Structures are given as structure tokens and as C-alpha cells.
Amino acid sequence: MGKYFKRAFYTIFLLFIAGVAIWGYTLTKSKGDKGLETITIGYQAGDPIDISKAHGQLVKKMAAKGYRIVFKEFQNGAAEMEAMSSGTIDFARTGDTPPVTAAANGTKLSLVAAGSSKSNGSGLVVKKNSSIKAIKDLKGKKIAYTTNTSSQYMVLKVLKQAGLSTNDVKLMDMSQSAAAVAFAKGKVDAWANWDPSTAQAELTYKGRMLVNGTKVDVNNRDVLISGQYASNHKTATQLLIQYLSEDMDWANTHKSKLVTLMSKKLKLSKAVVSRMVNRRIYKFSAMTTETTNEEQAIADLLYQEGITKKHITMSDYVLNLN
């Protein structure tokens, strides 16, 4: 009996110790999170969310209201849309094209807010010594872009203005990193992208902006998108927009500090970051008729070009926060 009693005792003792350990871990985790509700935001390097992350005030202000902000970096908006579709992130800051293609493909999303135009820093760059002097010279040339991003819309608008079609050029669908290498090595003739990549192409890869968004009516506006979270958490969403807006006000009035901060954050020269920062005004606010109409123009063109198979009405995806 003593032998069995000892075994039972040790078994109960080990179970007790394991239970205490699990309870302690749970207690520590709860205490460490301070009971905050987690909100996960997708962003891209150098965008307004990245600025808010580096500035540090968004996290503090949201924590004071009971929310813990987690940031996840992506290379482009198309990747963010995939993450949102799978439920990995609650919000995504993208350019204006990814939500259109995602919605057309059946992704459930809401347009929550819009930022300022990035038209001056978005466009097609070519090498300084390139024979391409005007957009009509793109005929027969290799153009790098990334599908389901604002660079794709940019290419379509540029070609349309030049009286060309996608059949008149050689479109090279590439990731931003692959396109950067291809452009630097002269493997492509033009590269459609946005800041900070365009600024880097100009100053580091001996490039020049052939055409920017202001010339072809492409704003490449920042857009804040959500899946199910925003519609179910309107108070948190309103706070997020408010604090992002305050961060953008700070960015506009502290551009020298912003350049220093983001140069370190992005590991880019101050010259590159300065060009990015000084050719735009930062902003974030709720969707308006103007920003919704811009999204509709993108949806219309992508459908006309056969890129999306469904013609959607973008106002159906705008979240009313009132």
C-alpha cells in the first residue's frame, strides 16, 4: 500500500505544481497586458502608420483608452489585404488601389478613413540617361510594377494619357524589392512606385521621375481599411482616426525632426527621406465624397481593363462612423 500511496502522492503533487505554473503564467500575462484589448494594424515602411509608430504617441494614447496597438509591417497593400482576409490584422493602411481589387475579389472590408495625396512622390521613374523623355516613349519598353497596388493603376493611367495600351509595352509584375534590383541594374526601363522607393530610385539609383501622379490624376491617397473590426468597434476606430490625425499634424509641423526620425527608422539617407517628407502634406480623416469618388474611378478603370471581373460600387464599402 505504501508504494501505491507514494505514487499517488507524487502524481497529485506534480499536477498541483503544473497547475500553479499555468495559473502563474496566466496571471502574469494578464497583468503584463494590463487588460488591454489588442488592435493589430498593418502598415508599410515610411507610411503614416510607420510615422505614428516611430513617434510613439499613438500607442500611449490608445493604451490610456484601453487598447494595445500591435504593428505588422508588409511590403505592399496587396499583402496586407491577404492578411486582412485571413483575419491576421484588424486594420490596414494601404494605397488607394488594394481595397478596390480586394473588394472586387470578394474580401469583406470597410473603408474607414483617408489620408492625403501622395501624387508628387508616386509615378514612373527612369534612369537619368534614359532615352525615354516623354510618356509616349514608353512604347515597347519594360515597365516594372506590382499587381493589385497603386503602381498598377498608375501604369494604366500613364498609358491611357499617352494613347498606349498594355499591349504596347512589356509589363513586368514584380515585388518592390525585386523591381528595385531590376531598376538599379538596368533590367527594366521604367519603374512604377511610390515614396520612399521613388525618392530612393531618384537619389540612389540615378533615376528621374518621368511622370508623377499630379500629371495623370493619380493621388495614390493613403486609405485606412478594416475587415469586421471597425464596424463592431466604432469607438476604438474613431479614437484611432483621431490620434492618427494628431500624429499627422505633428508630422507637418516638425518635418526636420520627422526626417531625422524616419531616416533612422528606415535606414535611408536623410536626403532620400527629406525628399519623401517635403513633397507631401500628411493627413488622416474620415472618408468623404471626394475620396470615395477617387476610389470609384479606380474601380471603374480596373473593371474596364479587365483586371477585376466585378464592377463594384465603392460607396457600399464606406463605413459610417456616426
Image (cartoon, rainbow, N blue to C red):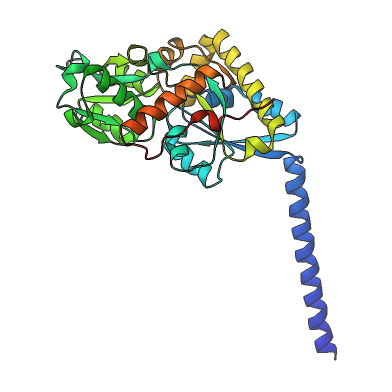
The residue nearer to you, when weighing 194 against 8, is 194
Residue 3, quarter of the rendered image: bottom right
Tell which of 145 and 160 is nearer to you. 160
Which quadrant is home to the C terminus? top right
From the top left corner, tell me how far across and down residue 80 is, in percent. 48, 38
Q: Is residue 267 visible?
A: no
Which residue sits at x=54%, y=41%? 108
Tell me what residue is drawn at x 58 percent, y 24 percent.
52
Q: Is residue 50 shown above or below 208? A: below
Q: With respect to residue 269, does 72 lie above or below?
A: below
Residue 16 image offset from top left, x and y in percent: 81, 67
Number of marks present in the image shown = 0
In the rendering, at what x and y percent does residue 287 appear?
57, 22
Place residue 167 in its image quadrant.
top left
What residue is rendered at 49% in x and 30% in y? 314
* Closer to us: 159 or 224: 159
Q: Nearer the viewer, residue 262 or 17?
A: 262
Position above or below: 199 against 88: above
Locate the N terminus by quadrant: bottom right
Residue lying farthest top? 253
Work out whether residue 257 can be spotted. yes
Residue 199 location (% of width, % of height): 36, 18
